[in-house]
Image (cartoon, grey):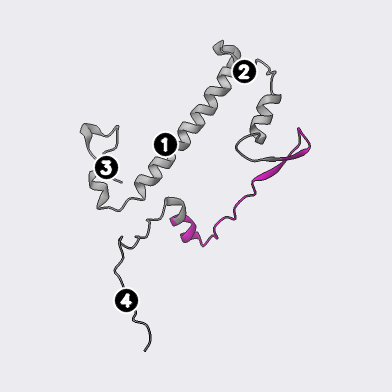
Amino acid sequence: MPAALQVLPREKPCPTEKPKTKWEKFRDERGMNPRKKRSRLIFDPITNDWAPRWGKDSVKKIEDKHNWIMEEKGIHRKAGVDPFTFERGVKKAKQEKQNLAEVKNSVSALAPSAMRDVKILGAKGGEVAKK
């Protein structure tokens, strides 16, 4: 006789499908293909060698290391701010803008039933902002 087969139920529930982000919806409407992954290494003209795109010894860090002199011009001179401090502030503002866009995208991807509990700061009287 063949060995008895015993089927056990799953310990955890089956995973649910994640809702699509704004970009994924837009891409599907336009019939665009998903982007290919970019390689981790790119050619760095400063060192004439291949360097990582991000992380330790990345191209951006090499560029920052070689950018030790900066012309004081335009906004820096008018504001009386150190140009290096100003550049750090610009980078930080750009990063905060990206983080805010990610949060907005994750909120918009929530199912409508889950939106009842979401309160958006800045809405009048603590109301939930509706689209």
Of circles 4 and 1, the one toward us is 4
Residue 19 within the magenta-colored segment of the rendering: no
Q: Is residue 29 left or right of residue 35?
A: left
Q: Amino acid at mark 3?
A: Val
**Quadrant in which residue 120 is drawn:** top left
Q: In this orientation, which residue lies closer to the viewer: 47 or 107? A: 47
Of circles 3 and 4, the one toward us is 4
Q: Which of marks 1 and 4 precedes in the sequence?
A: 4
- Estimate the spatial distance between the alpha carbons at disc 3 and disc 4, rounded to whole Å: 44 Å
Q: Are marks 4 and 1 in contact (CB under 8 Å)?
A: no
What residue is at 42 percent from the left and 51 percent from the top?
22
**Quadrant in which residue 78 is drawn:** top right
Q: Which of marks 3 and 1 precedes in the sequence?
A: 1
User: Residue tagged by mark 3?
Assistant: 118
Which contiguous range is marked in magenta? Answer: 25-50
Which numbered disc covers residue 74?
2
User: Residue tagged by mark 1?
Assistant: 100
Position of residue 31 measured from the top left corner of the image (x, y, whole percent): 51, 62
What residue is at 20 percent from the left and 32 percent from the top?
125
Q: Which of marks 4 and 2 precedes in the sequence?
A: 4
